[in-house]
Amino acid sequence: MGRLDEATFAAFHARTARALRAYVYRVVGNASDADDIVQEAFLRMLRADVPANTEEHLRRYLYRVASNLVVDRWRRRRHEMGEERILTEPASPRPRYEDDAAVAKIFAELKPRDRALLWLAYVEGESHEEIASSLGVGRRGVKVMLFRARRRLRDLLQARGLLVSS
Amino acid sequence: MTEWFDLDQDDEHAISAFMSRVANLRVPDLGSRTPDPAELWCKAKLLARWEAERRASRPLDIMQPIEIAGGLIAAGLLLYWSIPYL
């Protein structure tokens, strides 16, 4: 692939923008912020002049930039609003599992980093190495963080009565 | 993966099912603020050019106040030395 030219970038954008936007939207929970982050991630990738050895390499770079922007945005917002308001939304008593809004709400109760990890692992089907590369963290760290994210999600599902576990 | 990092199989199954529900949730259509790739390409090139110009003119920006200060000092010294002859 070498250096990116405009046509290659357009093709790459067509193949990745939708999936990236779905990922960012689900992690930040706001379409307008997701659009801003996706745009900024593509711009940073272009300005960094990343050697486009493989499309997968570019894709990882893009996801890493987007993930960092998501975390930056979350930290900024937490600073502005105070952690309490972001993390402790009142839990509705027994959401119906069939209800999309309830599913989205439960997912939104996780921290952005957990949402990103779970999305990359379960939706994108990435391996630990790939997640580590996408998030810019160590591979061993991913194992632990992913385990904790899964445990937190399990606890949330249990608390909502959506999971009967031993 | 070590056993230590594994959840109960039922829990794992429930999490997978939940995540597949999350994956299928509707994502709002692309907003009007999402630029097309051509627009992004132009914007990136423009930003890169501005950055290059800023980098190129940085030494000039740094030197300008030094030149002014040097000029003022030289003028002051000239004035000081010329006072006895005035």
Image (cartoon, helix red, strand yellow):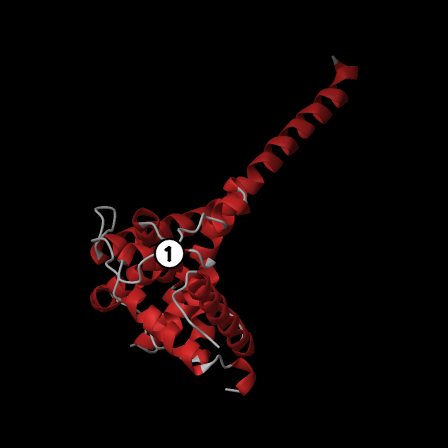
Left or right, B81 with respect to A5, comes to right
Q: Nearer the viewer, residue A155 or B69?
A: A155
Tally of numbered tags? 1
Task: Say if A22 sits above or below B39 in the image.
Answer: below
Check the image and name the residue furthest to the top.
Answer: B86
Q: Position of residue A146 (x, y in %)?
A: 48, 72
- Write down the residue under mark 1: A94
Image point (21%, 64%), residue name: A10
Element carrying mark 1: loop
- Quarter of the image holding residue A43? bottom left
Task: Say if A31 sits above or below A149 in the image.
Answer: above
Left or right, A4 with respect to A129, comes to left
The residue marked by circle 1 belongs to what chain? A
Task: Say if A57 sits above or below A36 in the image.
Answer: below
Quarter of the image where the C terminus of chain B is located: top right
Q: Is residue A52 visible?
A: no
Q: Nearer the viewer, residue A62 or B84?
A: A62
Q: Position of residue A12 (x, y in %)?
A: 25, 68
Q: Position of residue B74 (x, y in %)?
A: 68, 29
Q: Nearer the viewer, residue A55 or A72?
A: A72
Question: Given the image, on which type of amino acid does mark 1 rest?
Answer: Arg
Q: Position of residue A32 (x, y in %)?
A: 31, 47
